[in-house]
């Protein structure tokens, strides 16, 4: 039974530690974390002790258990002082650490020296029966333990009576694990003189500290907020929890709302009629409509702007925060500003319409992508080298067609044709750089580089072929002639940028890649096909994107020494 109880306590302490890790917050002090490390360690010592079958195992278990007695109580004491906001001088901390270490070193001599136990022996009678006689350092251990307990109780009582900036609920909760640990630590052994109460006290204390940690996380929210605001200055800060309890503020806020001077941390603002009359209506208005988050507070000749927002922790609303700033000067100018608002709005509306009109016209004369690129400030002469794909598309026999048609029908035919092609090109991230008579020059990977410009150009060409079939049906219905075109694609390095004079420039691309793409398009009629792809582009399509293409020929290209491989779909 004893062993089972100790095992259960050990696993409960492990569960509590896991829960603590889950709710851990960066503002938790390190002593609180160490408590959750040492409680399972001490509990394990009692499990090991209950399972000991020889004296050596019993002694080892005692050494583990006394880690709790020497160091766990130290960390509990430091945690109490930390949460009560009482600073311990470094030399005292060092002295206490040394004292605990010296006492624990005496514990390590058990079985080898009479310092801690004068005598220790064991016999086996339905279990290991141990008899021991305490040595002088065991008395020192008790003195050290009493120092820790008395110091902790003193700090708790002092904080409860004197310190207004420490939450009373947290202070009250701190008293519980201290009392439980004292009672259980010095309690008599029960259940046939075999079970000790200390591990029960440790685990109960651990549970209470878990509750304290959960509650402390709410106050750490206010700490985090205060860190981002000047502690003393023009900006005030106040935080309340969801039950209207005061969590904290800075000096500036207290100077503005003097009622907080006498309000304890964790005390409800409802206890002060003046504060309740000011803050509760703001909270009600904000809770009803979160957009209603700005209010004004007048004190004497000063007018303060109060911004209300929620306090969040792990995505949960935990309370309210108020940021207060002196808005007196701004209020003096509001009336003046309002007089100009109407005129300003009219001017802005007029200018906006002009900008939209200019932008629209600009976007119709160059592609939207190039327009946006230039409007970002890229309007100086010069350029950059890019690896991209160039497309040329030209209508077959258009000169003959246009000579036999009225000019207005030619224009309408071209406009419908170019509109259909532009949609296909834009759908695949291409931009039309220019119209050259009845030909289109389009770019892929310019001005914005792309890893798939070859595929975009190829898919755009496929769409253009399908679109032309549909357009020809529409042209036939209108009595217009059917159109045929040739498309040439080539990928390579080119120079892209603003070409021209300072007073008149054009965003375009130049280089051998452009010339080669144009000449490949011209070869479409020789090979009686509507699409030819250069070897460079074809290789990328087949290897990078798994496109199936058919080889056409290795052809001479004017201006190039080597023949160029041509492919089609």
Image (cartoon, rainbow, N blue to C red):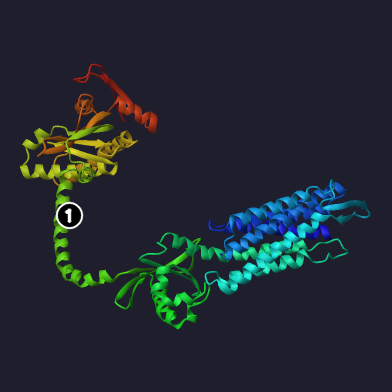
**In front here: 70 or 127?**
70
Q: Is 239 positioned to the left or the right of 460 in the image?
A: right
**Residue 247 appears anywhere in the view:** yes
Image coordinates for residue 116, horizontal then vertical, percent: 81, 53
Q: Could you say which quadrant of the image residue 140 lies in?
A: bottom right
Q: Is residue 360 above or below residue 246?
A: above
**The furthest residue to the front:** 91
**In front here: 199 or 345?**
199
Image coordinates for residue 315, horizontal then vertical, percent: 48, 62
Q: Total marks drawn?
A: 1
Quadrant into which the N terminus falls: bottom right
Q: Could you say which quadrant of the image residue 280 lies in?
A: bottom left
**In front here: 415 or 504?**
504
Image coordinates for residue 511, horizontal then vertical, percent: 20, 27
Image coordinates for residue 388, horizontal then vertical, percent: 28, 32
Residue at 82 percent across and 66 percent down: it is 188
Residue at 88 percent across and 52 percent down: it is 120
As helix, strand or loop, the secondary structure at mark 1 comes to helix
Q: Is 15 positioned to the left or the right of 557 in the image?
A: right
Mark 1, other Cα within 10 Å: few <14 / some 14–19 / many ≥20: few
Q: Is residue 203 above or below residue 41?
A: below
Instruction: Name the residue that disc number 1 marks.
Output: 356
Quadrant into which the C terminus falls: top left
Q: Is 375 positioned to the left or the right of 128 in the image?
A: left
């Amino acid at each position: 039974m004893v062993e089972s109880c100790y095992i259960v306590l050990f696993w409960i302490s492990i569960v509590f530690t896991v829960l603590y890790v889950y709710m851990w917050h960066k503002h938790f002090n390190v002593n609180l974390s160490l408590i959750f490390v040492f409680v399972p360690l001490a509990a394990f010592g009692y499990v090991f002790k209950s399972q000991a079958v020889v004296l050596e195992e019993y002694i080892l278990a005692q050494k583990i258990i006394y880690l709790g007695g020497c160091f766990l109580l130290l960390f509990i004491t430091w945690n109490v002082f930390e949460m009560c906001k009482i600073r311990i001088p470094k030399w005292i901390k060092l002295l206490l650490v040394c004292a605990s270490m010296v006492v624990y070193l005496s514990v390590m001599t058990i079985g080898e020296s009479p310092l801690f136990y004068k005598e220790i022996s064991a016999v086996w009678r339905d279990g290991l029966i141990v008899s021991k006689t305490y040595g002088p350092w065991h008395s020192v251990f008790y003195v050290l333990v009493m120092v820790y307990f008395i110091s902790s109780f003193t700090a708790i009582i002092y904080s409860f009576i004197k310190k207004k900036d420490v939450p009373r609920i947290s202070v009250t909760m701190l008293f519980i694990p201290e009392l439980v640990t004292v009672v259980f630590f010095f309690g008599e052994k029960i259940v046939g003189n075999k079970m000790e109460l200390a591990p029960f006290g440790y685990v109960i204390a651990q549970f209470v500290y878990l509750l304290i940690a959960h509650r402390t996380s709410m106050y750490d929210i206010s700490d985090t907020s205060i860190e981002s605001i000047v502690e003393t200055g023009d900006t005030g800060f106040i935080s309340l929890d969801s039950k209207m309890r005061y969590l904290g503020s800075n000096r500036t806020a207290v100077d503005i709302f003097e009622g907080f001077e006498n309000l304890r941390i964790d005390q409800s603002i409802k206890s002060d009629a003046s504060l309740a009359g000011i803050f509760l209506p703001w909270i009600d208005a904000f809770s009803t409509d979160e957009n209603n988050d700005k209010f004004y507070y007048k004190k004497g000749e000063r007018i303060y702007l109060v911004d209300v927002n929620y306090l969040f922790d792990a995505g949960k609303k935990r309370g309210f925060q108020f940021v207060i700033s002196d808005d007196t000067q701004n209020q003096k100018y509001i009336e003046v500003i309002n007089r100009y608002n109407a005129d300003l709005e009219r001017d802005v509306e007029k200018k906006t319409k002009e900008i939209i009109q200019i932008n629209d016209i600009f976007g119709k004369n160059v592609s939207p992508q190039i327009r946006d690129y230039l409007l970002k400030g890229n309007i100086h002469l010069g350029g950059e080298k890019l690896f991209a794909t160039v497309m040329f598309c030209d209508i077959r026999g258009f000169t003959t067609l246009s000579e036999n048609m009225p000019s207005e029908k030619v224009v309408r035919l071209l406009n419908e044709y170019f509109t259909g092609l532009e949609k296909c090109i834009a759908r695949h991230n291409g931009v039309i750089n220019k119209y050259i008579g009845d030909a289109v020059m389009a770019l892929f990977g310019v001005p914005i580089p792309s890893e798939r410009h070859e595929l975009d150009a190829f898919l755009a060409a496929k769409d253009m072929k399908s679109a032309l079939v549909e357009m020809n049906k529409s042209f036939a219905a209108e009595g217009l002639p059917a159109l045929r075109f040739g498309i040439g694609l080539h990928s390579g390095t080119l120079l892209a940028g603003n070409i021209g004079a300072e007073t008149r420039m054009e965003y375009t691309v130049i280089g051998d890649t452009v010339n080669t793409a144009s000449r490949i398009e011209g070869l479409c009629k020789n090979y009686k096909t509507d699409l030819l792809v250069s070897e460079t582009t074809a290789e990328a399509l087949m290897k990078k994107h798994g496109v199936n293409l058919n080889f056409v020929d290795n052809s001479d290209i004017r201006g190039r020494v080597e023949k160029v491989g041509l492919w089609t779909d």
